[in-house]
Image (cartoon, coloured by chain):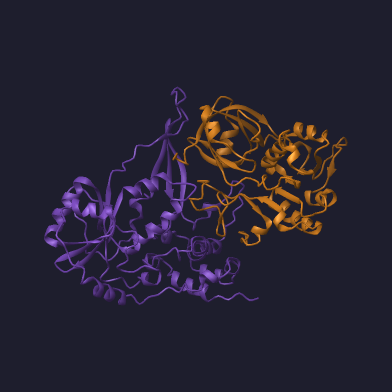
Amino acid sequence: MQNPYKAYPVRIDSIDVATEDKSLRTFTFVFLNPEDEQKFAYESGQFAELSIPGKGEIPIGIASSPTEKGFVRFTVFRTGLVTNHLHNMKVGDIMGVRGPLGHPYPLKDLEGKNIVIIGAGFAFTTLRSTIVYMLNPENRSRFGKIDVIYGARNPGMILYKDELTAWEQRDDINMHITVDGTDDPSWKYHTGFVPTITEKVAPQADDNTYAIMCGPPMMLKFTKPVLDKLGYKHENIILSLENRMKCGIGICGRCNIGKELICKDGPVFTLAQLKHMPEEDT
Amino acid sequence: MMKIINIDKQKWAGGVESLSKSYRLFGPVKDVDCHNFKELKQGEQPDLSYGNTKLSPKSVVFPPSEAMFTYSLDESNPEHHILKDVPKDYSPRAVLGMRPCDAKAVSLVRMNFDTPEYRDPYWMDAYEATTFVGLACENPCASCFCTSTGCGPYNEEGLDVLLVDNGNAYIAKALTEKGEKLLASGGFTDAGDASAVDAKKAAAEAKITAKIETDKLSEKVIMDLYDAPFWHDVAFACINCCTCTYACPTCWCFDIQDENKGCEGVRMRNWDSCMTPLFTMHGSGHNPRDKKHQRVRQRFMHKLKYFVDKYQKGIMCVGCGRCVQQCPVNLDIRTVSKTMNDYVAKS
């Protein structure tokens, strides 16, 4: 059995500034040993430890989709020791990727269902992976209606703009893009917080409709009652959580909420499951 | 069929000497004002006259600080920034004279490091290389409460050999093949007689009067205990010194850190503690456990409720009493457990 702490060596293939304020960059990695790409087989919603020898590791959701081959991609917010260092690295630099880790979104169970994706800020990465996966010609027919509600602080903070624009042109996905506020007179999408827009545009719930949500705590807190109002069952609301992690494999003991370890038992949970787990900041 | 061997104390030191030829030996030795488990130097004997060690012997399989990988940051090195395995010595090793509570702790902790999904190679390789030789307790400490944790002064779980002090000799029970092999390797071959053991065991157990109450913990609801009003009171005196987690044989949390010197570096793992705020602090500065009562609650809920629910193997405590003895503010897990055990949520 291979050492689960050992990262696969990767080369940075490209670095793209992802937001106007440059606080987020998208890193595309290529595995140094081609066979490692097979070993890294992942599903949307999983994460990996980005491993920079000499600095440390950070758990980051996988932004690329399993349908995209030859690379793995992450969009990273610059905030601490490792991410600051990462933002200053250059194309061609060598580092490591360890994973895939955690449970994915249960897309196999969602086949035949209508899906509402609700995301905000830079938590859109694994949702981007999910959308790309579902829109893949081989997969699209296996899902029902797809709605996407995505909010950012202002137009400059929207991730994956080109893809959002392309998805807007399609008739097999309903895009609902919003910003908290903007003074741009040419802004042609929604203005307002995600919960408000969700209330306006999300389809009424039925047993066949599921919501997948990922975003900052405040957005989640205020969107949950909206989904309640629309009649979504808690079993049909799927969320992805995060916490400080080290090992990522359920051993080092710090990321638990109650008896569940976010890294290994999650990061994906249904709202029904979360109801039995403590809210850690009380 | 369990083998019983009689070890004349006159022959013990010579046997240890023989064992040192095929095992790395760890045993209790005098360490300034207390005893602790250390690797025995050539010719050094374990001091089996100790009561209990200040720290548990968990470090034999789980060192406080351990190298995981090395790497080079020198870009002229063709393999720079690639993690390299660290050479490890997993030749046979043996712990001599560990207390039964600490042995049971190792088997509880194993459930964390050896899971269906992942096997922690460092902990497991060290564990599999180790033969655990226990020493039954004749004179338990006043703070011991092992008999109410599913353990006891003569408990055999997690041990390969149990030694029972019988005056001029040790009665050695070989509990596993590994244990038999060790006894043979030490030249301990005299057939023994275990008839004295039961009475001695009953006498030792009778000396342990302290108890921990846990019988109702499994039926409690996590959310009820979590939201119970007593955590601020429980945590009031705690100074988050981490002594309890450091001394505890069942605490396993660790941190991973890169340490660099020039262009060379080592990825280390180090014991960590849920008592420190940094343990859970997010990169954003948000901390789900930034308050003391949240951290104290995490420690007791983990040991007395989360673990109970997750594994159905009882509490994550073996009653060694170290945290009770060493806590500078007299926080007592037995009191906390009773509070939790007795708690009825208002409906």
Position in image of residue A41 (x %, y %): 57, 36
Position in image of residue B290 (x %, y %): 57, 57
Position in image of residue A2 (x %, y %): 45, 39
Task: State how many labels appear.
Answer: 0
Q: Quadrant of residue B175?
A: bottom left
Position in image of residue A187 (x %, y %): 85, 37
Please report the residue visible at 45 percent of the width from the left and 60 percent of the height from the top.
B241
In which quadrant will I find the C terminus of chain A?
bottom right
Looking at the picture, tell me which residue is in the foreground, B200 or A177: B200
Residue A158 visible in rendering: no
Residue B145 visible in rendering: yes
Q: Quadrant of residue B207?
A: bottom left
Chain appearing in purple on the rendered image: B
Instruction: Say above or below: A201 vs B85.
Output: below
Instruction: Say above or below: B232 vs A263.
Output: below
- Colour chain A appears in: orange
Please report the residue visible at 69 percent of the width from the left and 40 percent of the height from the top.
A130
Q: Is residue B34 left or right of residue B274?
A: left
Looking at the picture, tell me which residue is in the foreground, A273 or B278: A273
Please report the residue visible at 34 percent of the width from the left and 37 percent of the height from the top.
B87
In which quadrant will I find the N terminus of chain A?
top left
Q: Is residue A198 left or right of residue B341?
A: right
